[in-house]
Image (cartoon, coloured by chain):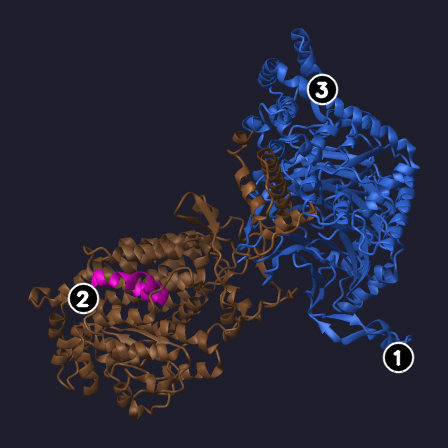
Chain colours: A brown, B blue
């Protein structure tokens, strides 16, 4: 009988029963064990069947241990203790034999008891109401399906559609602005959504026209920001259009005079914006995006502008993305980039310029990665004390900006700010224990081996170190000199020593096992490098093989125009924002008027535990109210219905 | 109280675990269930067999035509419960049904024939079991024949009946039939196929259901005669015996049904309902609305809008007048069920209702309701039940952590009544005494009610908003005061999880149903049930009052819906057709129709008067947890686990229907497959199962659910 059923049910063998009996000191005969085994199987099945009833009545899809225990309780069996966790328990397989078991980690109670990051308790259960679906007529079309024919649109809608598309793609910038604004706030355009999405998917046909691409991207932004639209599965389509702008070698980029870099930057920001606000609509979106970015990055045949797009895309998706995709990929990629940068032939000049763009983008990305990582390490330790956040803000307060550059146009920086805060919020909120990150010291060592001092300088200005707060702006030079040794600061929290140790060690680290990507050649590009290290640190750096030649060639005071932003000019301590710019080779030729990629940091404190808001962007919606993110602040989204 | 210890199959294994004897006996005791079945249908009593000797469950069938009999029984039972509790503080929850059992033994010798019949029943089953394997060849031939003739149910029941005894005698198991069966029998088959021992058979409730009740088949006379003739020709007496013993064949005159029609009605654990079970007259009409002095209404109206809408007042008055004058011919007598007198506050509420009703939006296919979603945030503990008050001023949630939470959804905060000492101080003659008794200090947006010791599965506000009922896994129903926010009464009697409870639309009475397969009717001022409605073959999963309070509907895991007469406790309707446990029911506002939703994701519509299935709404992809008709009954809203709210054109579904005497006689009609035409809209939520729906008095649709991150 056992063989009949083992196809359908879990079986407990008589050996198991015997074994269990032995472990409690009872000797069982074969027949008794067989009987018992069969009976236990039956009881288990019965309990499983009745436990499903508890699941159904709790209106859940997932059968929990609690359900099973209730079933056991009602059949007079003691409950199984110790498995009450809400999350699924992962099964591990043992190498020897087909054995599966539940991982049972030791819990260090001492550590738990002395932990300073006391978890905030669950937020209070509450009810919030939103009018999800007004007037019966506007939305007969179930969202997410393509309408059968244009005729299903009312005349008004059709007219609106024509006007809007004409305005956006037309010549008049003022009209465009009005149209975009309306697209952003109009509550009744749900039925038109598929059409707009279709228009936007036209990016592929206008890849020669930067202006049009830009306009289409703005259209995406407006649609995404419209709180009344439920994008649903259209998110995927929008994302693919935006990804096209980020990654593809556009026809427009053949002409070096065309500033397709800005377009890519903007598209990357837009991508992250879409992702953070609507990512939950499409499952696996994040993963997909990462995959396609990674694919581009790992494809050496692709032009550098595509690589650039991939890097800024990753950067915009947050430092986690950088850590996961860019960082592991960097060693392989570095060789290619190096080769490009090393080629001094005239014919290569344009490509090399592009290469510098990529270099700059990578630099910015990894720097933020390091900063955020340091921040994420230091924050849990500090337990979100107000003093700490204050210091971070203070530390971030230095504005790092390029000397000769005018501040970038407002809209861009605004968007950047918004997205940066999104990224950080998302970064802090997303579950990141699932994969083992490279520890910060190792990461820093590795990155340092690529970037050398330029990285070090930036890192030393990084956020999260209370040590920099006391220095007056005038002392900043000294501060930077002492950058590798913040251990001198006694105020650092207990996580800090670790970190400072890295900083001490990393410049000295001699000959990392990693193959060095031909530093001498890079050094040749380095005459303009603006590294303002004092001689003390230089000596330590010189020991580093990777940087020796670079630092050796460094003429004191001569700034390299490639990376001028590494210079600290009059830091404005008062502004709680941290801006850094990427410039490539082109930064020197400012005449081209290219807007540098700028990221502004407003270091958000670790989510101050306002779960209703944290979840607000995932609130249930019916019909076409979409994107609730920040608009449904508590004030307008309350328990009371304005009836 | 003395109790008899008998061997308890289920506990045998686990007795080892029990270190002391007392504990073991408690186990046994709790296993026991007594079932009091009030079946008016004499034939069903005759045909049903009682498997009492299984000792796990004792079934008693009473022919209870008289309601007072139940009452008397309830009183007896109540008395014993009392005695139990006095004797034994930690009294087992099962004690009172056990007491009931004892009482029946002692006082009702008429019940003993049941026990002897039980032994007989068991024997015949055993005979069938022994004989079955010998005749397998014949059996298979018949099965093939039946399948050829599209008699799917008979195929299935034959297979089951044949397969079942074989199960216990090894050879071949029920699981080998799974592939041939309709998917909706999968659950039953899974249970049956897990059986392998005679002892297990005795303890298995599903198996007992099959053995104690006949599987009902509806066959046209022609088909039946063909089957009979075939069996006689082949001299398959064995098969014939099985059919005789385990099937109830309900023969109707007329054309044999199509496969679609058969499929529509099948699915229940015990086959289709017998037609005579649905023959009783049901007074589905609405009760006459009490006369309410409209002058007061006029005054208010005038005071409220100075602009004056004299035009509007007239017709409303007329409509009210005409409605109250004409007595619905299908309505029960006004005093058929004693209903509580209207209090002044109730009258005020009625007036409010009428005023609101004038502002009601007339819904229709071209005028769909707006939907508001009440999302429960941070409900990590698990939201299990939601209810709104009729005027939509309060929302209550039942949670898996045993709490009940009440929120005010208007700016008016929830306040408690002052303490007794403070109440003494207030001036009782003042006009605003009702306001003065409230304690401002306790004002808050929400209140938490602690008291249950298990997840709260059912929740219901009283129509006057003064009380709240909650039913829980701990086997109790609690009545809470919304003035003091304390528990007033704990109604014990179910002893097993109580899945649902609901107040009568007129207040005072309430109905509950749970795992013990018995629905109970209670009155708030009685701690024992007034009626027990027994007959379902599995858990009662949802309960609903008819708008006229004279009937209650119960849905069950046996995949049937039953309608019970509150007056005499009779089962007056049995609806089959769902393919999964039924989780929600809704009466149309005119009382004529019933809608039901189940785990199969379908919504079925029923005509109560004729006892017919009249519609099938397909569209949901997961369990339908809530159904609600709009205030005028034009729109049916359904909310489901699949995170959607769907709106259906109820008017069309009911109007398209032709029912004449003939269809009523055959018990089925031709169902059109018009779900797509009836579907008016599908509205997605963001990963939030919709577990409750409610139409406000102005026909705004409120939906509620907990966001599942």
Label 3 or label 1, whichever comes before in sequence order:
3
- For residue B679, above or below residue B310: above
Q: Secondary structure at mark 1?
A: helix
Q: CA distance from mark 3 to mark 2?
A: 89 Å
Q: CA distance from mark 3 to mark 1?
A: 78 Å
Q: Position of residue A354 (x, y in %)?
A: 18, 66
Residue lying farthest to the left in this orientation: A345
- Look at the image and give the residue range highlighted in magenta: A312-334
- For residue B190, above or below residue B349: above
Callout 1 environment at 10 Å: few (<14), some (14 to 19), or many (20+)? few
Q: Nearer the viewer, residue B421 or B326?
A: B421
Q: Is residue A69 left or right of residue B659?
A: left
Q: Residue at x 27, y 54 (%)?
A: A295
Q: Nearer the viewer, residue B172 or A455?
A: B172
Q: Which residue is mark 3?
A: B127
Callout 3 environment at 10 Å: few (<14), some (14 to 19), or many (20+)? few
Magenta segment includes A451 = no
* Residue B672 at least partly seen: no
Q: Which residue is mark 2?
A: A355
Q: Which mark is residue B100?
A: none
CB-based contact (under 8 Å), mark 1 and mark 2: no
Callout 2 environment at 10 Å: few (<14), some (14 to 19), or many (20+)? many
Q: Residue at x 29, y 92 (%)?
A: A475
Q: Which residue is mark 1?
A: B425
Q: Position of residue A220 (x, y in %)?
A: 38, 60
Q: Chain of mark 2?
A: A
Q: Secondary structure at mark 3?
A: helix
Q: Is residue A175 left or right of residue B505?
A: left
Q: Nearer the viewer, residue B272 or A150?
A: B272
Q: Position of residue A39 (x, y in %)?
A: 62, 37
Magenta segment includes A330 = yes
- For residue A453, above or below residue A240: below
């Amino acid at each position: 009988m056992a063989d009949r059923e083992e196809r359908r049910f879990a079986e407990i063998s008589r050996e198991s029963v015997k074994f269990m009996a032995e472990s409690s000191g009872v000797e069982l005969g074969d027949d008794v064990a067989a009987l018992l085994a069969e009976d236990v199987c039956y009881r288990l099945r019965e309990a499983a069947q009745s436990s499903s009833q508890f699941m159904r009545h709790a209106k859940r899809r997932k059968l929990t241990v609690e359900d099973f225990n209730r079933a056991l309780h009602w059949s007079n069996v003691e409950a199984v203790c110790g498995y009450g966790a809400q999350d699924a328990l992962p099964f591990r397989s043992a190498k020897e034999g087909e054995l599966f078991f539940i991982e049972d980690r030791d819990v260090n109670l001492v550590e738990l008891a002395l932990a300073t990051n006391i978890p905030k308790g669950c937020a209070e259960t509450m009810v919030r109401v939103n009018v999800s679906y007004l007037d019966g007529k506007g939305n007969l079309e179930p969202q997410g399906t393509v309408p059968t024919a244009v005729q299903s649109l009312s005349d008004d809608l059709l007219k609106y559609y024509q006007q809007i598309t004409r305005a956006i793609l037309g010549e008049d910038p003022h009209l465009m602005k009005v149209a975009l604004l309306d697209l952003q706030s109009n509550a009744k355009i749900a039925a038109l959504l598929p059409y707009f999405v279709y228009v936007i998917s036209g990016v592929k046909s206008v890849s020669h026209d930067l202006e049009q691409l830009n306009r289409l991207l703005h259209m995406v932004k407006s649609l995404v920001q419209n709180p009344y639209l439920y994008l649903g599965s259209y998110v995927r389509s929008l994302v693919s259009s935006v990804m096209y702008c980020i990654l593809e070698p556009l026809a427009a980029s053949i002409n070096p005079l065309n500033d397709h870099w800005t377009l890519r930057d903007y598209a990357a920001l837009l991508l992250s914006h879409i992702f953070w606000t609507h990512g939950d609509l499409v499952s696996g979106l994040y993963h997909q995006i990462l995959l396609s970015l990674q694919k581009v990055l790992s494809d050496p045949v692709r032009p550098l502008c595509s690589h650039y797009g991939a890097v800024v895309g990753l950067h915009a998706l947050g430092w986690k993305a950088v850590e996961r995709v860019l960082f592991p990929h960097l060693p392989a990629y570095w060789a290619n980039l190096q080769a490009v940068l090393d080629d001094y032939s005239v014919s290569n000049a344009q490509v090399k310029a592009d290469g510098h763009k990529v270099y700059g983008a990578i630099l910015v990305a990894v720097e933020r990665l390091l900063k955020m990582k340091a921040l994420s390490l230091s924050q849990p330790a500090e337990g979100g004390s107000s003093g700490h956040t204050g210091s971070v803000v203070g530390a971030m307060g230095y504005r790092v900006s390029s000397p000769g550059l005018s501040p970038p146009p407002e809209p861009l920086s605004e968007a950047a700010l918004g997205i940066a805060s999104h990224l950080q919020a998302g970064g802090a909120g997303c579950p990141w224990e699932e994969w083992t990150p490279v520890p910060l010291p190792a990461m820093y060592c590795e990155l340092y081996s690529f970037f050398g001092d330029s990285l070090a300088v930036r890192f030393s200005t990084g956020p999260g170190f209370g040590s920099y707060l006391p220095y007056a702006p005038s002392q900043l030079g000294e501060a930077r000199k002492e950058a590798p040794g913040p251990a001198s600061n006694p105020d650092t929290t207990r996580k800090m020593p670790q970190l400072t140790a890295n900083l001490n060690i990393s410049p000295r680290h001699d000959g990392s096992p990693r193959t060095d990507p031909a530093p001498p050649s890079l050094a040749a590009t380095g005459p303009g490098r603006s590294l303002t290290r004092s001689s003390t640190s230089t000596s330590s750096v010189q020991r580093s093989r990777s940087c020796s030649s670079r630092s050796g060639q460094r003429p004191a005071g001569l700034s390299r125009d490639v990376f001028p932003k590494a210079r600290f000019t009059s830091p404005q301590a008062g502004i709680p924002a941290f801006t850094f710019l990427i410039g490539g080779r082109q930064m020197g030729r400012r005449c081209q008027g290219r807007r540098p990629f700028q990221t502004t940091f407003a270091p958000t404190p670790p989510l101050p535990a306002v779960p209703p808001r944290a979840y607000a962007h995932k609130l249930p919606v019916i019909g076409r109210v979409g994107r609730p993110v920040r608009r449904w602040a508590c004030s307008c989204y309350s328990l009371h219905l304005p009836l | 109280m003395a109790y008899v210890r008998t061997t308890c199959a289920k506990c045998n294994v686990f007795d080892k675990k029990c270190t002391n004897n007392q504990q073991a006996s408690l186990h046994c005791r709790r296993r026991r269930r007594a079932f009091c079945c009030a079946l008016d249908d004499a034939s069903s009593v005759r045909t049903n067999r009682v498997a009492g000797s299984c000792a796990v469950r004792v079934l008693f069938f009473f022919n209870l035509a008289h309601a007072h009999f139940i009452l008397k029984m309830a009183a007896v039972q109540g008395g014993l419960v009392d005695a139990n509790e006095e004797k034994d503080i930690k009294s087992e929850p099962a004690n009172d049904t056990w007491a009931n059992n004892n009482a029946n033994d002692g006082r009702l010798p008429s019940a003993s024939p049941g026990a002897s019949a039980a032994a007989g029943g068991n024997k015949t089953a055993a005979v069938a079991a022994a004989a079955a394997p010998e005749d397998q060849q014949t059996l298979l031939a018949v099965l093939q024949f039946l399948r050829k003739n599209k008699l799917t149910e008979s195929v299935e029941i034959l297979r089951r009946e044949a397969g079942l005894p074989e199960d216990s005698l090894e050879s071949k198991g029920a699981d080998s039939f799974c592939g041939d069966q309709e998917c909706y029998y999968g659950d039953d088959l899974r249970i049956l196929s897990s059986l392998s021992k005679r002892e297990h058979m005795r303890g298995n409730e599903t198996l007992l259901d099959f053995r104690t009740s006949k599987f009902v088949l509806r066959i046209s006379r022609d088909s039946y005669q063909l089957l009979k003739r075939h069996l006689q020709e082949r001299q398959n007496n064995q098969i014939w015996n099985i059919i005789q013993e385990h099937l109830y064949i309900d023969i109707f005159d007329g054309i044999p049904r199509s496969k679609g029609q058969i499929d529509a009605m099948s699915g229940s654990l015990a086959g289709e309902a017998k037609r005579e079970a649905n023959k009783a007259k049901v007074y589905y009409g609405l009760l006459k609305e009490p006369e309410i002095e409209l002058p007061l209404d006029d005054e208010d109206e005038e005071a409220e809008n100075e602009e004056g809408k004299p035009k509007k007042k007239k017709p409303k008055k007329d409509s009210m007048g005409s409605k109250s004058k004409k007595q619905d011919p299908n309505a029960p007598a006004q005093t058929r069920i004693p209903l509580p007198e209207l209090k002044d506050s109730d009258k005020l509420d009625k007036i409010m209702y009428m005023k609101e009703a004038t502002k009601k939006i007339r819904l229709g296919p071209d005028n769909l309701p707006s939907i508001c979603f009440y999302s429960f945030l941070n409900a990590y503990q698990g939201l299990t039940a939601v209810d709104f008050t009729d005027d939509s001023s309060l929302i209550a949630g039942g949670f898996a952590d045993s709490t009940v939470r009440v929120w005010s959804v208007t700016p008016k905060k929830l306040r408690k009544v002052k303490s007794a000492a403070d109440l003494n101080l207030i001036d009782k003659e003042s006009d605003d005494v009702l306001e003065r008794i409230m304690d401002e200090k306790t004002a808050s947006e929400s209140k938490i009610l602690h008291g249950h010791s298990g997840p709260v599965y059912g929740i219901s506000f009283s129509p006057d908003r003064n009380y709240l009922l909650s039913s829980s896994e701990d086997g109790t129903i609690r009545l809470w005061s919304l003035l003091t926010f304390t528990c007033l009464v704990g109604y014990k009697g179910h002893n097993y999880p109580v899945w649902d409870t609901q107040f009568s639309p007129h207040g005072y009475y309430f109905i509950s149903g749970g795992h013990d397969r018995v629905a109970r009717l209670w009155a708030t001022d009685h701690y024992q049930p007034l009626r027990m409605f027994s007959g379902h073959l599995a858990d009662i999963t949802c309960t609903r009052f008819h708008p006229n309070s004279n009937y209650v509907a119960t849905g069950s895991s046996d995949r049937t819906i039953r309608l019970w007469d509150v007056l005499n406790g009779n089962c007056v309707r049995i609806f089959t057709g769902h393919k999964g446990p039924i989780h929600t029911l809704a009466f149309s506002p005119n009382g004529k129709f019933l809608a039901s939703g189940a785990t199969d994701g379908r919504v079925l519509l029923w005509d109560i008067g004729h006892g017919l299935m009249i519609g099938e709404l397909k569209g949901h992809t997961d369990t339908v947890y809530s159904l609600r008709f709009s205030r005028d009954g034009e729109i049916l809203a359904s909310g489901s686990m699949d995170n959607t709210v769907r709106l259906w054109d109820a008017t069309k579904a009911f109007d398209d229907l032709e029912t004449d005497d003939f269809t009523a006689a055959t018990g089925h009609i031709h169902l059109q497959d018009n779900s797509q035409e009836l579907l008016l809209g599908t509205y997605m939520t963001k990963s939030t199962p919709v577990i409750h729906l409610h139409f406000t008095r102005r026909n705004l649709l409120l939906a509620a659910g907990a966001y599942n991150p």
